[in-house]
């Protein structure tokens, strides 16, 4: 699971290296495709601009302020991160947490990756590591208040299943780094320790995410919408162990892909919310695990 690397953080203190991680990781946009002068005449239309605006840094993870398709300006804003980034500890397999009090803070970033505000939660709306790996916080601020005070819009959350082959960016507010790659495919079951996630996104190898990128929004560069939340990768070739997830197909065949990283889809989330950004797990079509 992509929580911060203790060794990397220790190295930063010793070296006084500031925000750059001690573990090698790509600089922002280093994996982005480059268009040469000869190609410009035939290049595709410009894609949605993807930067740090609307992302947040947590104390130990990344995240983003998200807006559902049915959200209104006056609704309390929501922050999306991972289930394993929950401040009270990892939810157990099968556990679903709803309506838990929280006063967690988040550093809101602008397009350049500069923190412009500290946002505060008043509750954990939803958190689980079963079937998916998500935590959704409700903030004390509305979307309109955030826009008015800081000029920053929430990231729109898509409500349709993404497709293999699309270009994506994984935007880490914790490290202030952007990883660029494609969706390589989808995993029937992804197993890590005692947890199992379903229909996970597998990245192509260019998204070599590291500790601290947990909870980063995965953005479809064609639409600018969040389609998944970054959560794990196989670090050392282990088989179905913590930090070494394995893929399990519908026939039970296990595949280990060392160095490959994964995310959990988020298109199921909007169908579980009603007016006012209110969670309603009883809604028709809501597919999120229930307590």
Image (cartoon, grey):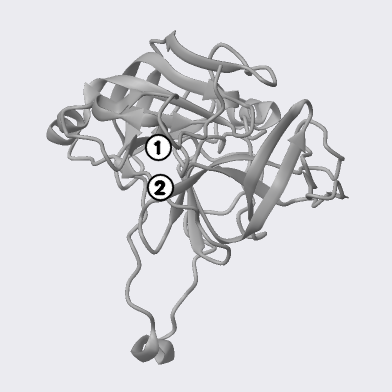
Q: Is residue 149 visible?
A: yes
Q: Is residue 178 above or below residue 10?
A: below
Q: Residue at x 32, y 47 (%)?
A: 112
Describe residue 20's horizontal placement relative to residue 186 as left or right: left
For the residue pair 271 and 59, the one nearer the viewer reads as 271
Element on which disc 1 rests: helix
**Front-lying residue, 16 or 53:** 53
Q: Nearer the viewer, residue 221 or 31?
A: 221
Residue 84 image point, x, y percent: 60, 25
Where is the C terminus found, in terms of image quarters? top right
As drawn, the label of residue 150 is none
- Measure the C-alpha gap from mark 1 to mark 2: 8 Å
- Count of numbered badges drawn on the protein: 2
Q: Residue furthest top?
A: 101
Mark 1 touching mark 2, by CB under 8 A? Answer: yes
The earlier-in-sequence mark between 1 and 2 is: 2
Residue annotated with mark 2:
159
Disc 1 crowd, CA 10 A, few/some/many (<14, 14-19, 20+)? many
Residue at 59 percent of width and 39 percent of height: 21
Instruction: Find the residue positioned furthest to the front.
Output: 284
Q: Which residue is mark 1?
A: 271
Report x, y in % for residue 234. Answer: 76, 44
Query: Which residue is located at x 36 percent, y 42 percent?
Result: 113
Which structural element holds mark 2? loop
In this rendering, is residue 200 above or below 32? above
Establish if 118 lies above or below 33.
above
Q: Tell which residue pokes out farthest to the left in this image.
A: 148
Image coords of residue 244 (percent x, y)? 79, 38
**Horizontal side of residue 197 vs 155, given as left or right:** right
* Residue 64 visible to an observer of this rendering: no
Viewer-proximal residue among 279 and 151: 279
């Amino acid at each position: 699971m992509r929580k911060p690397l203790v060794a990397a953080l220790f190295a930063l203190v010793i070296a006084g290296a500031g925000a750059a991680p001690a573990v090698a990781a790509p600089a922002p946009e280093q994996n982005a495709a480059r268009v040469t002068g000869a190609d410009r005449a035939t290049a595709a239309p410009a894609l949605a601009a993807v930067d740090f605006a609307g992302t947040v840094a947590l104390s130990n993870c990344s995240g983003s302020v998200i807006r559902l398709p049915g959200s209104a300006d006056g609704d309390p804003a929501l922050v999306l991160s991972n289930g394993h980034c929950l401040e009270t500890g990892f939810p157990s397999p099968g556990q679903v947490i709803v309506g838990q009090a929280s006063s967690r803070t988040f550093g809101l970033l602008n397009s350049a990756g500069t923190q412009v505000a500290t946002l505060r939660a008043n509750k954990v709306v939803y958190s689980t590591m079963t079937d998916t790996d998500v935590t959704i916080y409700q903030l004390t601020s509305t979307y309109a208040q955030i826009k008015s005070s800081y000029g920053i819009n929430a990231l729109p959350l898509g409500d349709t299943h993404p497709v293999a082959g699309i270009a994506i960016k994984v935007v880490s507010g914790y490290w202030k780094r952007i990883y660029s790659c494609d969706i390589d495919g989808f995993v029937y079951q992804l197993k890590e320790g005692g947890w199992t996630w379903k229909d996970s996104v597998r990245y192509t190898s260019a998204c070599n995410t590291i500790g601290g990128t947990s909870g980063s929004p995965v953005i479809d560069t064609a639409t600018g919408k969040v389609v998944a939340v970054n959560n794990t990768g196989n670090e050392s070739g282990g088989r179905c162990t913590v930090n070494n997830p394995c893929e399990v197909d519908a026939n039970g065949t296990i595949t280990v892909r060392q160095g490959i990283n994964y995310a959990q889809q988020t298109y199921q989330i909007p169908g579980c919310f009603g007016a006012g950004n209110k969670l309603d797990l009883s809604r028709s079509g809501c597919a999120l695990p229930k307590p």
